[in-house]
Structure formats: structure tokens, C-alpha cells
Amino acid sequence: MAKIQMTTPIVEMDGDEMTRVLWQWIKDILITPYVDLKTEYYDLGLPNRDKTDDQVTIDSAEANKKYGVAVKCATITPNAQRVSEYNLKKMWKSPNGTIRRILDGTVFRAPILCKGITPYVPGWKKPITLARHAYGDIYNSVEERVAEGEQAYIVVTDKDGNELRRQLVHSFRDSAGIVQGVHNVDKSITSFARSCFNYALEQKLPMYFAAKDTISKTYDHRFKDIFNDLYEAEYKDKFEKAGIWFMYTLIDDVVARVVRSEGGILWACKNYDGDVMSDMVATAYGSLGMMSSVLVSPDGNYEYEAAHGTVTRHYYKYLKGEETSTNSVATIFAWTGALRKRGELDGNAELQSFAEKLEQATIATIESGEMTGDLIPLFHSEGITPVKLNSKEFLYAIAKRL
């Protein structure tokens, strides 16, 4: 068959461990036989990030700005154990955090639903979409160990460095300890709020935003004020016409509301809250391997990724030559999301159609009873006995339907 042509490349950000292995298999088995794939390739595997002093991550984000669409494999964010394991120069920051900071985007994550896989929360009948602010908080924090007897302050200066005010964080009189400084900026919070309101209108989803302004009376309260002011000024009438609503409430309250809901809502979270809650929601729907994720920047750039980690345990088995049964659905949907958006932006209907069909083939494979091991305990469909496939067999089963 003649391959589907592409006119503009996608930025391809390769990753680490088992997801890196799946990345190549997905291209070989499901994409390049049908698409004349054009990508600008960046190796974000940990060894290459270390070799380039993480410049490759910055370059990939800048390339995303140039071409508008990127697809990213899962990557390692190193801790002390990884520094030793990979003999790294330093404990490099999260590549996702770096990319999100450069693009100043919002991460939208939603479960990939299949008949036969019932959520752990019985009342959830519709997808819950998580919107995660992708800037600031602990992902761009400054941290210090503090010795006993030392003191830590927040100090604010003018543009010339002259001190304007200071506030004692803590006096470590009786014990050494730790201190952390986090920040955010009004511009990014406003972009985040606007992205969420626009997405809610596009998808016709009612929307929660939650923080903890009762405790964090300046930091979290600023988020609350920006969301509420923007909603009242620009979005209230649009939401009412669309028949949807926006509500701010405390993070602990919204958790209770979401668990009791039937789904079908957009839940906007600050950066750290979104990191935790998106994994909770994904797992409650069945599996972290069944979650789509896209970073959307205010100026219309898109970066699609799998919402899970690098599946280290399976990678070590793979290196020993042992069989693995690794769920590749989220990584497949990262590729389909990027290909669909590339087709949409380029007016390439064939490419959009291919992406849709690949998603349909993936869902149909699972619904017919062929799946990876993580989904077997979750799958219950009358008259169908699920069959466990290894990592590669699952991709070939999808290819058969495709």
C-alpha cells in the first residue's frame, strides 16, 4: 500500500527503560508500515541527558515551539539511587518539568475507557479529566539543608537587589532541618485558568478548581482569586449558555465530591496536586497504562505523552531475556494524539483518520479479550475469557485489527 504522507514533522522525544523498548516496537509494528513518518528526533534517555548536560531536553522543548506538535516517551527523573546506577554528573531535574516550564502549558489527562474494565469506584460512569498546572511549585523549587542554630528567611528585593522585606521561615535552634522555597507567577496561573476554561467549554464539561487557601492564605489564595476573577470577567456567561458550571472549593472537599460523582467533569489542580491526583484517578479507572496525557501551551503547542513511568521492573526482566507483558496503550495514544493533531493542523485528513483507526483497533483488541497482564484482573465481560499476551504479542494483535 502507499504510505500516508506527512508534510510537517512531529518532534519525537525518546525516553528510558521499558517504555523506550515499546516506543520502537510501536513505531515498527503499528506506525511506519502505514505512515511515511517524519519526525525531528531528540534522545531524552537519561544517558544522553547526562552527556549533553540536559541541553537536549531544552532543545526538544524549543523544537516543540517550532513545529507545534511533539510526542514524548516516559523518562526517568533521577534520585540518588539513579545517580549511582547511571554514574550521572548530577541529579538532573525532571525533563517533564523542564519542558512544561519552557512551554508554560497545562497538562490534560483522561482515562482511556474500554468495555469490560470497570472502575474501582463503582459510580464513575464517565471519564474524569484532570487538568494539571505545568509550572512552578516543588518542580521549580529551591531547597537547602539547614544546620542547627541557623535561620531561614524569605527575602524580597527590588530589581537592583535592595532588600524590601524579609520574613522568618523558621529558626532551627534545636535541630537541623530542611527548607524549601516555591514560587509561581500571575501570568502562568492566568494562562492555566484560561486553558482550563477553554477546554471545559470545548468538551462541555463542568469544572472544579481546588487548592487550600484556608491554610495557604497568600500562595493558594492567589490561584483562587485569579480563577474566580477570570471566570467572572470572561467565562461566566459562556458557561451558563453551554449549560455547565465552574466551582472553586478546597482540595479535600473536591476529592470527596469527585469520588461521589459519576464522572464527566474537568478537575483543575495545581502542579503537585495534579501529579498525585491524576495517578489516583488513572488507577481507580483501572490502570496507569490506560491514561491519555497532553500538554497544551497558551500559544497552541501540543506535547503528547504517556502518563506513567518507565516500567523499570519489566525493563530488568527484558534485559535478562525474560518475557514481559507491558501495557503500551498510553504510549500508543500518545502517538495517535500527536498524529491526529499534526493531521488537523496540516489539513491532512488521511493522517487524522489513521490515528482514529489505530485507537479503535487498540480498544477493540482489549474488548475482544486480548490484553496485557495488568488488565486481566480488571476485565469482566460476559462470554469472554481474557487472554494474556506478552508485550509484543499485544502490539501484533492490534496490528491484525488495524
Image: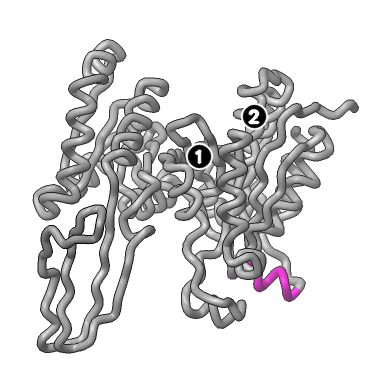
Lateral position of residue 209 relative to residue 200, left or right: left
Name the amino acid type tagged 1. Val
Give residue 342's mark: 2
Report whether residue 368 is seen: no
Question: What sort of colour scheme is used for the picture?
Answer: one colour
* Residue 322 included in the magenta stretch of the image: no
Q: Furthest residue to the front?
A: 160
Disc 1 crowd, CA 10 A, few/some/many (<14, 14-19, 20+)? many
Secondary structure under tag 1 reads: strand
Q: Nearer the viewer, residue 274 or 42?
A: 42
For the N terminus, the quadrant is top right
- The residue lying at 13 percent from left, 58 percent from top is 164
The residue range painted magenta reads 313-320
Secondary structure under tag 2 reads: helix
Among numbered discs 2 and 1, the one appearing first in the sequence: 1
- The residue lying at 21 percent from left, 35 percent from top is 226
The x and y percentages for residue 160 are: 25, 56
Q: Furthest residue to the top?
A: 241
The x and y percentages for residue 39 are: 73, 41
Residue at mark 1: 294
- The residue lying at 54 percent from left, 78 percent from top is 83
Q: CA distance from mark 2 to mark 1?
A: 13 Å
Main secondary structure type of the part rendered in magenta: helix
Name the amino acid type tagged 2. Arg
- The residue lying at 30 percent from left, 47 percent from top is 270
Report whether residue 159 is seen: yes
The x and y percentages for residue 349 are: 69, 18
